[in-house]
Amino acid sequence: MDKATLDRIDSEIVRLLQKNAWKPNKQIAAAVGLAPSTCHERIKNLQRSGVIRGAHADVDLRAVGLNLEVLAFIKLAKYERGAIDQFMSDMESVPEVRRVFLVSGRHDVIVHLAVKDIDHLRNLGFDRITSQPMVVSIETSFVYDSRGRNELSIFSDGGSTDSAQATKGSAQSKKHGP
């Protein structure tokens, strides 16, 4: 299933699962107006097609002893597909790495890390990052705070997002009354 075949119901199912991946199928089915078996089959199709790639728990890093989040901005020695793919895979395999981004601009790669403390970061940098021959330079920034959401706007066959339509409708109600 490609993006073009995502209909309104599939979009709503994805939106509900983004908010809570543990929501029971019966509740999702009721929310989108489908029989539970039909809803379950749609979810399986979304998984098979790669629209839904997995479900993840949102973990409080400090609760598990990871008190420091860091962004490492890395410049690479060469910009060749095979070497970059290998570097990205190597970084992804490091347990402390949350995300790896190949980016444009001054740096080539940004690595989001979660570590216990500054000593843990230093050792990780020496042992797993700067020891790689591909790495020319690394700059790090500490994350003091972050905000985000897991729910993304999903385009259905109408070409606009459900949340944009809801916001537009909400604004019109306020403007013109009930």
Image (cartoon, rainbow, N blue to C red):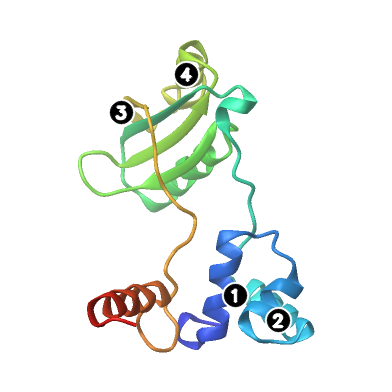
Residue beneath disc 3:
136
Which of the two discs, 3 and 1, labels the residue nearer the N terminus? 1
Whether residue 51 is visible here, answered yes or no, is no
Q: Are marks 4 and 2 in contact (CB under 8 Å)?
A: no
Residue beneath disc 1:
13
Res 39 → quadrant: bottom right
Q: Is residue 64 above or below residue 81?
A: above
Which numbered mark, 2 or 3, is in the foreground of this view? Answer: 2
| Label 2 environment density (alpha carbons within 10 Å; few <14, some 14–19, many ≥20) | many
Res 14 → quadrant: bottom right
Whether residue 168 is visible here, answered yes or no, is yes
Mark-to-mark CA distance, 3 and 4: 18 Å
Mark-to-mark CA distance, 1 and 2: 8 Å
| Label 4 environment density (alpha carbons within 10 Å; few <14, some 14–19, many ≥20) | some
Residue beneath disc 2:
39
Which of the two discs, 2 and 3, labels the residue nearer the N terminus? 2
Specify the amino acid type for callout 2: Cys
Which numbered mark, 1 or 4, is in the foreground of this view? Answer: 1
| Label 3 environment density (alpha carbons within 10 Å; few <14, some 14–19, many ≥20) | few
**In the structure shown, which secondary structural element does the residue marked by tag 1 occupy?**
helix
**In the structure shown, which secondary structural element does the residue marked by tag 3 occupy?**
strand
Q: Are marks 1 and 2 in contact (CB under 8 Å)?
A: yes
Q: Is residue 89 above or below residue 77?
A: below
Q: Is residue 11 above or below residue 66?
A: below
The N terminus lies in which quarter of the figure? bottom right
Which numbered mark, 3 or 4, is in the foreground of this view? Answer: 4
Res 29 → quadrant: bottom right
**In the structure shown, which secondary structural element does the residue marked by tag 2 occupy?**
helix
**Which residue is outermost to the front?**
177
The C terminus lies in which quarter of the figure? bottom left
Which of the two discs, 3 and 4, labels the residue nearer the N terminus? 4
